[in-house]
Image (cartoon, rainbow, N blue to C red):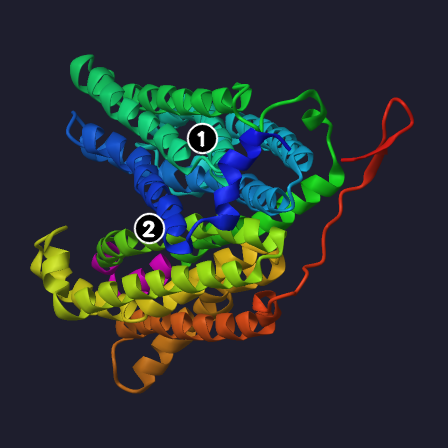
Amino acid sequence: MGNETIDTTKELGTRHIPALLWKYTLPAVVTQIIATVYNLVDSIFLGHVENGALILAALAITLPIMNIIHAFGSLVGAGAGARMSIVLGRKDVRWAEKILGNSMILTFFFGALFVSAGYLFMRPILGLFGASATTISLAQEYMDIVLPGMFLTTLTFNLSGLIRASGYASKSMWIQVSGALLNIVLDYLFIVLLGWGIRGGAWATTISMAFSALLAVMHFLNPKSFIRFKRHCWEPKMYIVKNILAIGISPFSMNVAACAVVALLNHQLISYGGDLAVSAYGVVNRVSMIVFMIMMGVCQGMQPIAGYNYGAGQNLRLKHVYSLALKWNIGLGIVGMLLALIIPRLLVMMMNDDPQLISIAVPAMRYLLVMAPLIGFTATNSQFFQSIDKPWIAIVTSLSRQVIFLIPLMFLVPLIYISLGADGLSGVWCSCTISDLLGATLSALLLYSQRKVFVPGYVPPERKPRKERGPNGIINQQ
């Protein structure tokens, strides 16, 4: 391994953990915030044009489709990033390069799949997600332009994660930031100055996605990057594909489940509280996302450090970075909880001042954020299990809150509330609180079952690469 490898990755195994975690967390938090810009900036500009309300309705219809495509990006990107951190901890650059190439193959495969399916079945898909006769044409007009750009988003997501995993956390952040800033400039140019309407928003998004993807690809073409595209990395290896998908299936399942759970939860909210209850949930969700985005940034900052030290067998450093990330996220959860309990009305009024909406959203915020410290605990554990190559435990941890517990509880608890003379809407909110508590309990039990990874001297079982015979008959590691 060359000196450039040592220069970029040795700090993952040697630098003071608090400083290291801060270095990797700050860009990850910024990236999380930037990720929301692509969802917001088009809406902000298009909401003020003629027929803005109708255009916003069309954009809302496209959001679940874009979330599902993003889930495929996390399937490849999160899995490849976690695997690369682990093999770099084992000082195996050749294996890391193969992960890079095989993750690109997967990205192009899934990209071709969903772009083709999107163009073939776009109108039925939009109808499935609630497009009406008045919004389906606008939604299709937007998606016809954005769909190829969504492939570029998954490409950027994958490569940015690999850039971060290989020691370039700040560079990964600036790639995302540059695309978002370009999106804002192009939105103003295409929508405000040129008056292109929804097509302008679509082109602004697509061009900015292409720009970010280009910057990410250029990093791995740069001879100064020690992990870069080489001829051998493009050879498909089934064991690498399986390793990537095994880890990536956790965030993928979580994203897909989130889409399904939101649909079911909205159904329950409409049943017990009407449209205002759905609006209240949207307001609370936007407020809480500020806390949860920062938590996810901490988790993403922890991932390359934990993965590297797990692969290197430095178990005390692994324990240190996990403990510190956990403290940060529980602390963030406590701040979110206190804000929800002390000033919920003020937080809601920042979004909307309708008295009826406030009366519903205030108790909802208390129900949904009272367990924020435990959500931080569960989120940290889920990312930690991904980092140490425990994909199925990560899946159970990720889905426990949203699927295993919340789906049955959102139907059961309101009925119990009604039988006790309370209102069913409070029961829907309470089901979220109970699922957070049960999810954290299950997460703690799973963490206890894996406590051996923190013991000095513990050697994790390797997923050893197969061997291949070179042109001279010499057997080389893949």
Q: Nearer the viewer, residue 429 or 172?
A: 172
Q: How many marks?
A: 2
**Residue 293: mark in rendering:** 2
The range drawn in magenta is: 265-279
- Magenta stretch, overall SS: helix
Which of 378/233 is in front? 233
Circle nearer the viewer, 1 or 2? 2
Residue at the far top: name it.
194
Q: Which amino acid does label 1 sit on?
A: Thr
Q: In the image, residue 265 lies at what x, y percent?
A: 37, 60
Disc number placed over residue 31 in the picture, else none: none
- Percent position of residue 157, x then y: 47, 35
Q: Is residue 181 above or below residue 439?
A: above
CA neighbours of label 1 inside 10 A, class few (<14), some (14 to 19), many (20+): many
Query: Looking at the rendered structure, which numbered label has been put on residue 153?
Result: 1
The quadrant in which the N terminus is found is top right
Helix, strand, or loop for circle 1? helix
Q: Is the C terminus in the top left, top right, bottom left or bottom right quadrant? A: top right
Horizontal placement of 417 versus 166: left or right?
left
Kind of residue indicated by mark 2:
Met
**Residue 214 quadrant:** top left
Residue 84, position as x, y percentages in the image = 59, 41
Along the line of sight, the residue nearer the viewer: 413 or 311: 311
